[in-house]
């Protein structure tokens, strides 16, 4: 008689890990972050509470990992399997068109319930939790900022923007208004608004 297959502990661990992250995203959308609990995540994922605490210290840490994984999966699906640069910033030679393309995609992402709810939860948690804020910046925001910086430096070399501008400040000029309008819900967030932000920012960034 053939012997029974030995369970693959690593594969089982990976399945549990993925189930926990998926459960966190599902629950934050269903009940909101204030009512999200480790117990509820464990029940939805079909694991014990101690399994979660073995990997994460808090529900915020679980949600942050889930949000990062969500973005990575979306990037991989968009770029296709085997891509080594899933976060590439377009460089068509037309800085205005490239910035508008990326900022419109950002608007679409912010307006999607898949991203909007966990993003808002993490932004709120970051106000009172410095550790989560620092991790959110380093793992979610900074990689995106660096792509903007690299594209703006290329534009500097091409003479399309002022040679003495600070790319980090320029990134905030482009992305800050969109983030503020989304976070505070002051006015509708649209592609037209994103385009207007890019156009206005480039007026100030242009060589004189």
Image (cartoon, rainbow, N blue to C red):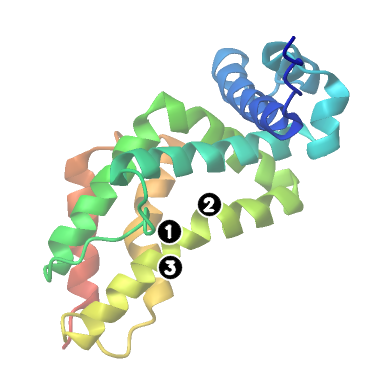
Q: Is mark 1 on a helix, strand or loop?
A: helix
- Of the residues under marks 2 and 3, which one precedes in the sequence? 2
- In percent of the image, x 34 and y 38: which residue is there? 77
Q: What element carries label 3?
A: helix
Residue 93, image x, y percentages? 12, 71
Residue 120, image x, y percentages? 54, 35
Side of 196 relative to 38 (left or right): left
Q: Is residue 60 visible?
A: yes
Q: Splitting the image into 4 quarters, where does residue 28 fall?
A: top right
- In percent of the image, x 30 and y 36: which residue is there? 108
Is residue 12 depicted above or below 82 in this figure?
above
Q: Are marks 2 and 1 in contact (CB under 8 Å)?
A: yes
Query: Where does label 2 land, which residue?
Result: 140
Which numbered disc covers residue 116? Answer: none
* Label 3 packing within 10 angstroms: few (<14), some (14-19), many (20+): some
Q: Is residue 183 visible?
A: no
Side of 98 relative to 113 (left or right): left
Side of 158 relative to 89 (left or right): left
Query: Where does label 1 land, which residue?
Result: 144
Disc 2 and disc 1: Cα gap in Å?
7 Å
Q: Are marks 1 and 3 in contact (CB under 8 Å)?
A: yes
- In percent of the image, x 75 and y 47: which residue is there? 129
Query: Where does label 3 land, which residue?
Result: 146
Side of 190 relative to 25 (left or right): left
**Which part of the image, by quadrant, shows the N terminus?**
top right
């Amino acid at each position: 008689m053939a012997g029974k297959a030995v369970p693959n502990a690593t594969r089982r661990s990976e399945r549990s890990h993925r189930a926990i992250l998926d459960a966190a995203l599902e629950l934050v959308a269903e009940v909101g972050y204030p009512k999200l609990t480790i117990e509820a995540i464990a029940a939805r994922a079909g694991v014990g509470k101690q399994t979660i605490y073995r990997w994460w210290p808090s529900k915020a840490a679980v949600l942050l990992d889930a949000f990062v994984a969500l973005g990575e999966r979306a990037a991989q699906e968009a770029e296709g399997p085997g891509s080594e640069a899933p976060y590439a910033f377009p460089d068509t030679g037309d800085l205005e068109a490239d910035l508008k393309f990326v900022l419109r995609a950002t608007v679409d992402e912010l307006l999607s319930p898949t991203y909007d709810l966990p993003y808002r939860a993490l932004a709120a948690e970051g106000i009172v939790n410095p550790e989560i804020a620092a991790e959110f910046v380093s793992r979610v925001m900074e990689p995106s900022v660096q792509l903007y910086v690299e594209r703006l430096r290329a534009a500097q070399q091409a003479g399309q923007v002022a040679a003495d501008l600070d790319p980090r400040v320029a990134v905030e000029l482009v992305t800050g208004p969109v983030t503020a309008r989304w976070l505070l819900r002051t006015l509708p967030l649209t592609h037209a608004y994103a385009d207007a932000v890019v156009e206005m920012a480039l007026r100030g960034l242009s060589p004189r």
